[in-house]
Image: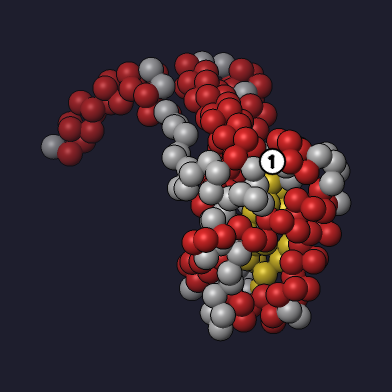
Amino acid sequence: MLSVTKNALRPALSRAFGAGKAFKHTLPPLPYAYNALEPYIAEEIMTLHHTKHHQTYVNGLNAAEESYAATDSTAKKIALQSALKFNGGGHINHSLFWKNLAPASENGGKLPSGGSLEKAIVKDFGSVDAFKKKMNTVTAAIQGSGWGWLGYDASSGKLDIVTTANQDPLLSHVPIIGIDIWEHAFYLQYKNVKPDYLSAIWNVINFEEAERRFVEASK
Ligand SMILES: [Fe+2]
């Protein structure tokens, strides 16, 4: 009986996938106003970053997934891999990034004192200030566009600072905090001075979200 039901569903599922309906990704709403991160990240940057750049990744991911579903050619599927990686990574990374930030008036920049994340940072980096300094140094040294990450390595049980190039998502670690170091994230406000952007962003890092991710990852 069950197999009959499953077989009966197959044509409908096939039509849905063929039409790309199962692959529709959408731009998640920003969890605060576009000007809420000022003066550390300007309203113009946030508006363009969210409505233009992230939307472009969403559109590219939908197009790539629809093309992938529409072809039976293995060669064409292989040719689509880079578009899937770039746009899919862009969508994953930015969806994480918006939640990773919070207005300074709503506890942005405040690491919960005595919490498990603070303890782990002190254990693995010596102090919170040493951690921020190291993460800024490593992120600023990325050649070209990419992301700096505080990631949790489940195999070692440690926090690490790692980077990914372009829009590659972080796969080796569980992302706890991500910093977008593409020029579109800072250039309108900070020009070429990456260290100033990296110093400022700590005022709007959502450490409560980072703590939640860390607790979940290290269970
Ligand atoms: Fe970005």
Q: What residue type is labelled 1?
A: Ala
Residue 7 percent across, percent down from the top left: 24, 28
Residue 160: image quadrant is bottom right
Residue designated by label 1: 185
- Judging depth in this view, the residue of 75 and 155 nearest the camera is 155
Disc 1 residue: CB within 8 Å of ligand 1 = yes
Residue 38 percent across, percent down from the top left: 61, 49
Residue 161 percent across, percent down from the top left: 73, 62
Q: Name, please, the residue furthest toward the front.
A: 39
Q: Is residue 198 left or right of residue 72?
A: right
| Colour pattern of the rendering | secondary structure
Q: In this view, does 172 lie to the left or right of 106?
A: right
Q: Name, please, the residue furthest toward the left.
A: 1
- Judging depth in this view, the residue of 105 and 53 nearest the camera is 105
Numbered circles on residues, count: 1
Q: SS of the residue at dot 1? A: helix
Residue at image location 39% in from the left, 18% down from the top: 18
Does the image show residue 121?
yes
| Image position of 24 with respect to 179: above or below | above
